[in-house]
Amino acid sequence: MLTAINPATGEVVREVAPDADAAIEEKLAKAHKAFHAWRKLSFGQRADILKSVAVYMRANMDDMAPVMTEEMGKPIKESIGEVEKSAWCADHYAEHGESYLAAVSLPSDATRSYVQHLPLGVILGILPWNAPFWLAFRFAAPALIAGNTCVMKHDPHVPGCALKIEKAFKEAGAPEGVFQALMLETPRVGAVIRDPRVRAVSFTGSSRGGSAVAAIAGSEIKPVVLELGGSDPSIVLADADLGKAADVLTLSRIINAGQSCIAAKRLIVEAPVYDDMCGLMRERLAALKMGDPASETTQIGPIARSELRDELHRQVTATVDAGAKLLLGGSPANGPGYFYPATLLADVKPGMCAFVEETFGPVATMVRADDEAHALSLANDTDYGLAASIWSETDRGEKLARHIVAGQVAVNGIVKTDPRLPSGGVGKSGIGRELGPHGIREFVNTQQVWVGPAVG
């Protein structure tokens, strides 16, 4: 069974029977058949469906958002925001997909030569639990407007979210087979990746999981996009607005109870302002309210599963044992559910657990840097390369951005994903890009057309 456990209570809230092999075959056949008709529709016709999906989601916010809160513990205000952001993504690609994929003329010896962007076929999305709606639309909206069809294998701990997303497409009038949820246990997804009707794979999750998916897809010579983990650095230099930096980094660290790949994790602070920044972060983190994610006043909900909380506590304990200072939190909350309080670790050094590993929870790690050059060295001292932020005078921050080894850098602002901008990582944080004009071109055939006769 695909089982959803409410992490605020530890109680089973939903069990969904996985699809039998025959059902998986039927869904893949429908997706393959639907592709041949879907690709022939105009951009405007495909856009109408995406717009209808967005309208449905906004009209049914009260039906969709609470399922997210129930199944993975996201505070309800964040769940509502995620459904709205997903609808925005659908609208964005409905409006801009055609221009993103417009043919590009290139000079050559032809009378006319150009590149056009054509759909590939059935695209498989393999998704995690931490942003169930947003990650689904980040994968599906650009793929669909390009003329592909989508099958989504969601995390088995959020089956209700998967069914709500599929329902949105059905209720919005999407043709049968254009978007479907595969209710599937993770060990069975390998066979779907290998199915010849699946032409490409989008995976969001751990680096270990991404490596396994890439190995299978590579053996079948299929393109993949991998959005994996991160140990994202945030450099705070002495000329930064410390109050603003502390406000934004606190928010970044505790969104979704810190269970975000692009959350600020390693706060690397220049020595002259290090103690002040530690004080500001402690003050802000201590003021946050942890509790029932269904309450609109809750700022930190539970960790999604008990084993994830145990792993987070192991990382905190190992870091303190290695010599870091525990300024706040650091122990699992008593009572039902999988709560872990806002935690602040100071004097963390390279080699310590919280410096090396991705911490998936509300744990802020403070690292002292001697100066700008040392801060950059510390920021890049990681196998990951997903995102980063720099807090400094604006021109200085922009100049430093090119020296950060990461797929995206925010200067004096929060790191976030945005349908208008490409997102993705380097190193063990992944390959390829999602979103923006770059992401939509990951799952198309970039076809060169040469029209004679030759000239010149």
Image (cartoon, helix red, strand yellow):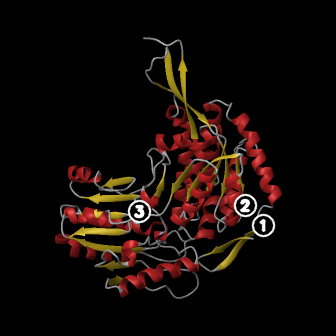
Q: Secondary structure at mark 3?
A: loop
Closer to us: 308 or 290: 308
Q: Is residue 329 visible?
A: no
Tag shown at residue 384: 3
Q: Is residue 451 left or right of residue 371?
A: right
Residue 128 percent location from the top left of the image:
58, 63
Q: Secondary structure at mark 1?
A: loop
* Residue 183 - label: 2
Which quadrant holds the N terminus? bottom right
Amino acid at the residue labelled 3: Tyr
Of marks 1 and 2, which one's residue comes earlier in the chain? 1
The quadrant of the rendering that contains the C terminus is: top left
What residue is rendered at 49% in x and 49% in y? Answer: 432
Instruction: State the CA–CA distance, disc 3 to disc 1.
Output: 36 Å
| Disc 3 versus disc 1: nearer the observer | 3
Mark before the other along the chain sequence, 3 or 2? 2
Q: CA distance from mark 1 to mark 2?
A: 8 Å
The span from disc 3 to disc 2 (Cα, nearest Å) is 31 Å
424 to 96, vertically: above or below? below
Estimate how packed mark 1 is, as few (under 14), some (14 to 19) or many (20 or more) residues with alpha carbons within 10 Å. Answer: few
Task: Tell me the amino acid under the disc marked 1.
Answer: Ala
Q: Nearest the camera: 10 or 348?
A: 348
Residue density around tag 3, few if under 14, some if 14–19, many if 20 or more, within 10 Å = many
Say what secondary structure mark 2 lies in.
loop
Can you identify the residue that label 1 sits on? 17
Quadrant in the picture for residue 83: bottom right
Residue farthest toward the left in the current orientation of the protein: 272
**Marker disc for residue 407:** none
Q: Earlier in the sequence, mark 3 or mark 1?
A: 1
